[in-house]
Amino acid sequence: MLTFNNRTALVTGAGRGIGRAIAETLAKNGVSLLCVSKNPASCGAVADAINAAGGRAVAKAVDVADPAAVKQAAAELLSQAGKIDILVNNAGITRDGLIGRMDDADWNDVIRTNLTSAFLWTREIAWPMCRNRWGRVINITSVTGLVGNAGQANYAAAKAGMIGLTKATAKEFARRNVTVNAIAPGFIGTDMTAVLSDDVKQAATQFIPMRRFGTPEDIAAAAAFLASEQAAYITGQVLAIDGGMAM
Ligand code: NAP
């Protein structure tokens, strides 16, 4: 049984896939949710589903790649909620291509959405956690950030950057009782991987010792643990959840 003492969590990319599963799992554990995603219909539907199931959630549409929008939304959500105890930096995109053919926009969009957004939310939300002497930051990186992947130089750089951000902020915040950890999923069945052809999915499965893609709930279970009281002495870690792929 995980313990949460009247905690509030902000999850980015909560509209679908892994973020939605994390938001719903935390809500089932009694955590109040601030569900952020780009499309209002997407985060709105998740907040509605959580409230209909007896939880507490509000939705906020924010483009996490826009620094001014993140700053304004963070201030609004902090004042609305009073405090935010748990931050899950999960929003992410892919714009794959071999580096010789990768244009500046594909590089910048992925770095801004996946990496700079985590810096922005951490600065605006996690810094106030330090004043409260309690907090949890969970950054959703990828095994690609650990081992690289041909055709994903932008994504691998962003995800490896998130690991550096995790370790640096873990050290900065440790004395304030704020932990910062990263989860590195392998192949997970979401909209992000639904676009892969059957041939690519079959080839990818051959590299997974467990011979299957993971589920968003596999990631959510670990995120809930890292956000709980029970994970108080774990910080600066990267937990690969990948069916054994990156061991
Ligand atoms: P997904 O199903 O494509 O969902 C992505 C979520 O991010 C959506 O809710 C989307 O918002 C939100 N988002 C994207 N760009 C945004 C922006 N500019 N501003 C605000 N929100 C934005 O992806 P997923 O598979 O669940 O992935 C979640 C995270 O896990 C990502 O960081 C991804 O890199 C990482 N990951 C995934 C896998 C995998 O195999 N699926 C593996 C390793 C790591 P809307 O719903 O409003 O569109």
Image (cartoon, helix red, strand yellow):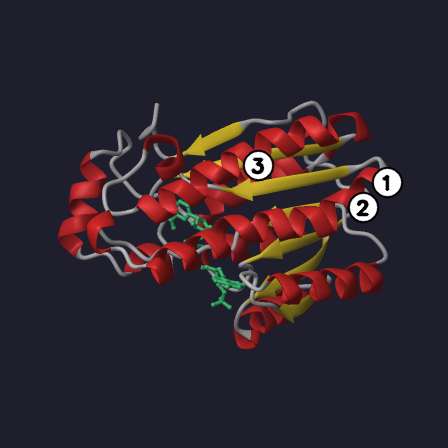
Q: CA distance from mark 2 to mark 1?
A: 5 Å
Other-residue count near label 1 (Cα within 10 Å), few / some / many at <14 / 14–19 / ≥20: few
Can you tell which mark lies on residue 161? none
Label 2 beta carbon within 8 A of ligand 1: no
Q: Quadrant of residue 23?
A: bottom right
Instruction: Say what amino acid the circle numbered 2 marks.
Output: Pro
**Residue at 76% across, 43% down:** 127
| Residue 237 % position (x, y) | 56, 27
**Residue at 79% across, 58% down:** 78
Other-residue count near label 2 (Cα within 10 Å), few / some / many at <14 / 14–19 / ≥20: some
Question: Is there a contact, CB below 8 Å, between mark 2 and mark 1?
Answer: yes
Other-residue count near label 3 (Cα within 10 Å), few / some / many at <14 / 14–19 / ≥20: many
Does 61 sit above or below residue 94? below
Read off the residue under disc 1: 131
The N terminus: image quadrant: top right
Does 37 sit above or below residue 85? below
Pick the residue in front: 191 or 90: 90
The C terminus: image quadrant: top left
Can you tell which mark lies on residue 165? 3
Read off the residue under disc 2: 128
Question: Is there a contact, CB below 8 Å, between mark 3 and mark 1?
Answer: no
Pick the residue in front: 50 or 37: 37
Say left or right for 103 vs 17: left
Say left or right for 190 vs 200: right
